[in-house]
Image (cartoon, rainbow, N blue to C red):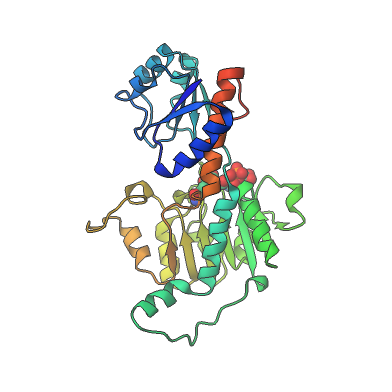
Amino acid sequence: MKLIMFSTRDDEKPAVNKWSIRNGVEVRTVKEDLTLDTVSLVEGFDGVCIQQRTDITNEAVYKRLSDFGIKQLALRTAGYDIINMDLAERYNMKITNVPAYSPRSVAELVLTQTMRLIRQFPSIERDMAEGDFRWSGRIAREIHTMTIGIIGAGRIGGTTARLFHALGATVIAYDPVQHDELRSILTYKESKTEVLAEADIVSLHVPLDSTTINLIDASALNVMRGGAFLINAARGPVVDTSALIESLQSAKLAGAALDTLTNEQNFFNQDLRGKVQTDKNLTLLMNMKNVLLTPHIGFYTTEAVQNMVDIALDNALDIIHLNRSVNEVV
Ligand code: NAD
């Protein structure tokens, strides 16, 4: 049994080696994405694992994979919109994803950024870098006196709620789907508006879909408490960035931490040193003393990477051996 893994990063290789030894299955890792130019690498392998941004829309790729006897494509990500599902079905190819790799990974980033925001680290660090070491007027609240509002209390939102509850904070949440096991640590509210109006810190954990685009727009920001903080580690377009910038500029909001931004594919995970930044909103946010930006690193922990690799390769084996997987997407 031999699998081939495309778009392999160096940091994934230890996880791949561990999985390979544990399962007695050879995994060849290559850096390239799966495209028409690289599909010939699959010849002689029994299964394929991928993780890429480039859509696989060319029918010839699916046909060649099928000609090589490939029955599956195992994605190492939750999203699978790079796949043309009609073409996959036409060539009898089963697609699997990794729906959850480590909710804790994103939840711990949210906790970190929240603590940094309430202690005013973004402005303190900038001022200190210029030689201003004064702290007068920079009094902070302690987390156990604060109310955390979670919008979207699923895997990541629920895990985030548990961390804040453990620190003694009051946690409230809005989610149309309520989970009984979370009731002991948070209070569900009937609407997003109630959460926005009551929380000192609002953290977003909804998927991006037609109901969540601009979920936090100018009117939602107006409902938030004066001096509140907003955290977005979900998806950029969930927040109307221009409205957020206005709210921060008018000091209605005390600060924001953003791990995702609209159009982030144009700048996150790229080395743009020495290049002129053309994204106006990114430039404005980077110049704000009460904003923390991170380049979509919520998912990026050793545990999450190991889980992505393990679950994706397990899915590939399940399809090859059993013709089914719990993580098959339809
Ligand atoms: P999940 O499906 O377990 O939870 C999402 C929750 O949002 C569900 O409970 C759902 O009912 C709720 N929801 C859907 N629409 C809503 C709405 N309009 N208002 C309120 N709640 C709504 O998903 P998850 O695993 O917790 O992931 C959440 C999101 O986090 C992902 O969709 C992804 O966008 C983001 N994410 C970010 C990173 C990162 O690196 N920053 C990593 C992984 C996931």
Q: List x then y, in percent, for residue 53.
A: 39, 37
Q: Who's the residue at 38% across and 27% down the image? A: 56
144 or 325: nearer the viewer: 325
> How many numbered marks are there?
0
Q: Depth check: 10 or 234 in front? A: 10
Residue 2 in the image, given as x and y percentages of width and height: 47, 22
Q: At 38% from the left edge and 75% from the top edge, which residue is drawn? A: 126
Residue 23: x percent and y percent? Answer: 57, 29
Q: In the picture shown, does residue 39 fall above or below 113?
A: above
Q: Is 236 positioned to the left or the right of 307 in the image?
A: left
Residue ID at (55%, 53%): 106
Q: Quadrant of the C terminus?
A: top right
Q: Quadrant of residue 165?
A: bottom right
The answer to whether residue 263 is visible is: no
Examine the rendered structure and indicate whether residue 306 appears above or below residue 72: below
Q: Quadrant of residue 110?
A: bottom right
- Where residue 108 appears, x then y in whole percent? 57, 57
| Residue 119 falls left or right of residue 296 | right
Q: Is residue 246 above or below residue 55?
A: below
